[in-house]
Image (cartoon, rainbow, N blue to C red):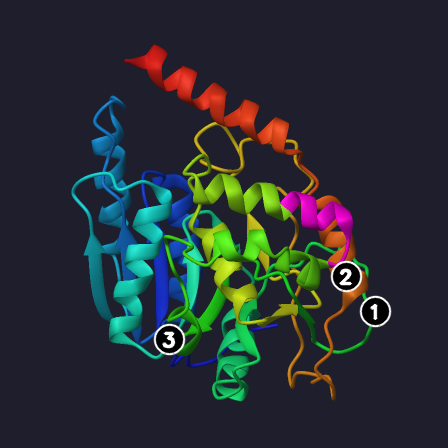
Amino acid sequence: MTYNYQLKTPVVFLIFNRPDTTEKVFESIRQAKPLKLLVIADGPRTDRPGEAEKCAATRAIIERVDWECEVLKNYSEINLSCAKRVSSGLNWVFEQVEDAIILEDDCVPHPSFFRFCEELLERYKDDSRVVSISGQNVQFGRQRTEYSYYFSRYNHCWGWATWKRAWQYFDFEMKLWPEVKKHNFLGDILIEPQAIKHWTETFQSTYDGQINSWANRWTFACWMQNGLSILANTNLISNIGFGTESTHTGNKKSKFANIPTEAVEFPLKEPPFMIRDMRADSFTQSTLYHQTFLRKLKKNLKKNVDLILSK
């Protein structure tokens, strides 16, 4: 099937130091030919030999835009780290545009992903109940309905889209967290004890600066607005970045690595209701988010030790 679709929605491309994966995602963007491309890049770390050259090689790929396209760049010459670079970059994006499709340098989309996002950005642009749209599906073929997508509490960020109206609630400092924790409001949102424990630990670690994640902060912001996310009922994104050079996806053998993509069919089959799929969310929680706090702490400790030893 060919996808001769003129994409009008701006595309955001998050890049850093991996020209190999960036090249593959860039080619997918090139096929979609967006009229506006906003590129966010972090700077090299001073303690990593050769990283400056890798960052330069990655940025050089953007110079190969050969279609009619306005390219806007937000490049940092110093390393801000994943959490601050992505979040400050997206703050910049939504100073320029009202909505956007967002891809990281290791998330290769199916060609139908772009139209999927664009149509739903338009459909739900004024519906504040919906905060994001994602092509990432981790149900491994489990599907409760025959519709093209379902509603979830999880705002997966391997290939996603959102609006300025939703991003305005992003708060890097997570100022609401102490009150939410004190009154156990996560219990009202998550219900399941395992999920409450996991996300209490995750948000506390993020708030304390032990976990360097913009995505956890974004999830927290979405939940504070009781927001729903739209998730495709077929997987539209393959993360090809698992490995030692990845910040958050180091296990090459993970079942979430390189998941095959599958087309979403058009016209979309729209669900006639807006009800969160609790069964799908429960499966996601027990698989994608099952990692214990102790394992996270050990992994972060190992990274810190490796960093010290490399100096």
- Give how far across and how far down residue 128 sits, in percent: 52, 82
Neighbourhood count class around disc 1 (C-alpha, 10 Å): few under 14, some 14–19, many 20 upward: few
Decide which of tag 3 and tag 1 comes sooner along the chain: 1
Q: What amino acid is found at the position of numbered circle 2 in the picture?
A: Ala
Pick whichever, 256 or 59, lies toward us.
256
**Residue that numbered label 2 is attached to:** 280
Q: Nearer the viewer, residue 196 or 299?
A: 196
Q: CA distance from mark 3 to mark 1?
A: 31 Å
> Quick one: SS at disc 2?
helix
In magenta segment, residue 195: yes
* Residue 88 visible to the viewer: yes
Query: Which range of residues does the magenta coloring cover?
Result: 191-198
Q: Amino acid at mark 1?
A: Arg
Q: Disc number at residue 144?
A: 1
* Neighbours of disc 2 within 10 Å: few (<14), some (14-19), many (20+): some
Q: Quadrant of the C terminus?
A: top left
Q: Position of residue 309 (x, y in %)?
A: 35, 10
- Who comes first in sequence, dot 2 or dot 3? 3
Callout 1 touching callout 2 (CB < 8 Å): yes
Q: Nearer the viewer, mark 3 or mark 1?
A: 3
Q: Which mark is residue 164?
A: 3
